[in-house]
Image (tube, helix red, strand yellow):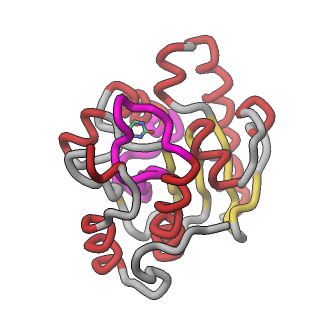
Amino acid sequence: QTARPMVEVADMDWEQLTATVADCTACPLRQTCTQTVFGVGDKAADWLYIGEGPGAREDALGEPFVGQAGKLLDNMLAAIQLKRGENVYITNIVKCRPPNNRNPSEDEARQCAPYLARQIALIKPRLIVALGKVAAQNLLNSTDTIANLRGKVHDYHGIPLIVTYHPAYLLRALPEKAKAWKDLCMARAFMESQS
Ligand code: URA
């Protein structure tokens, strides 16, 4: 069940949504983070990448995936001829940094979900790439593992969705990189098959 945000976001345009997220105090995360991190990139992108939540560097700079994991994400994009900001939008399940980079709780993710849903509706991506377990499980309303969820094209309310490993996990589990690269190639091939 989707939580009702403090204000109705379903009809908001991009600017209204950005301002509403910046002012949000719907869950306790806003009390400990520095700022909200809305997302970055092309607001009409075909490719939408969704991570978990801002880390320390993202919290300081106000942009998603700007730390070590972000560097790897940029390499993952480059591997399939994509570039941050060019036909790509990047955001997270939660817009505020969870303390000590813990996973967002179910309730925090639920409170933030209407914002992401509205972002997706406004961007209208042709493909969503869910980065890691938190993004995949929240978007697909699933408790399944990444190992089981990757390798196929899922459906997110009519938008194709592909799951791959989170770049922060890949930094710790280098052998899994080959599988992530396979996922990216599948995503690229899927997009080409659709155009
Ligand atoms: N990890 C995420 O999931 N998102 C970020 O923005 C940075 C690190």
Note whether residue 26 is visible. Answer: yes
User: What span is colored magenta in the figure?
Assistant: 77-105
Q: For the view shown, which residue lies furthest in the bottom direction? A: 11
In the displayed structure, does residue 178 sit left or right of residue 84? right
Relative to the observer, which residue lies in front, 35 or 14? 35
Note whether residue 124 is visible. Answer: no
Relative to the observer, which residue lies in front, 22 or 151? 22
The image quarter in which residue 75 lies = top left
State whether residue 122 is above or below residue 80: below
Coordinates of residue 8 in the picture (x, y in percent): 45, 83
Q: Which residue sits at x=54%, y=53%?
A: 107
Number of marks present in the image shown: 0
Q: Is residue 96 magenta?
A: yes
Q: Which residue sits at x=44%, y=52%?
A: 94
In the displayed structure, does residue 195 sit left or right of residue 15? right
Q: Which residue sits at x=66%, y=42%?
A: 163
Looking at the rendered image, the quarter that the C terminus falls into is bottom right
Looking at the rendered image, the quarter that the N terminus falls into is bottom right
Coordinates of residue 49 in the picture (x, y in percent): 50, 50
Q: Which residue sits at x=44%, y=80%?
A: 9
Coordinates of residue 186 in the picture (x, y in percent): 70, 41
The image quarter in which residue 161 lies = bottom right
Q: Looking at the image, in which quadrant does ligand 1 appear? A: top left
State whether residue 176 is above or below residue 164: above
Name the dominant secondary structure of the magenta segment: loop
Coordinates of residue 126 in the picture (x, y in percent): 60, 64
The image quarter in which residue 14 lies = bottom left
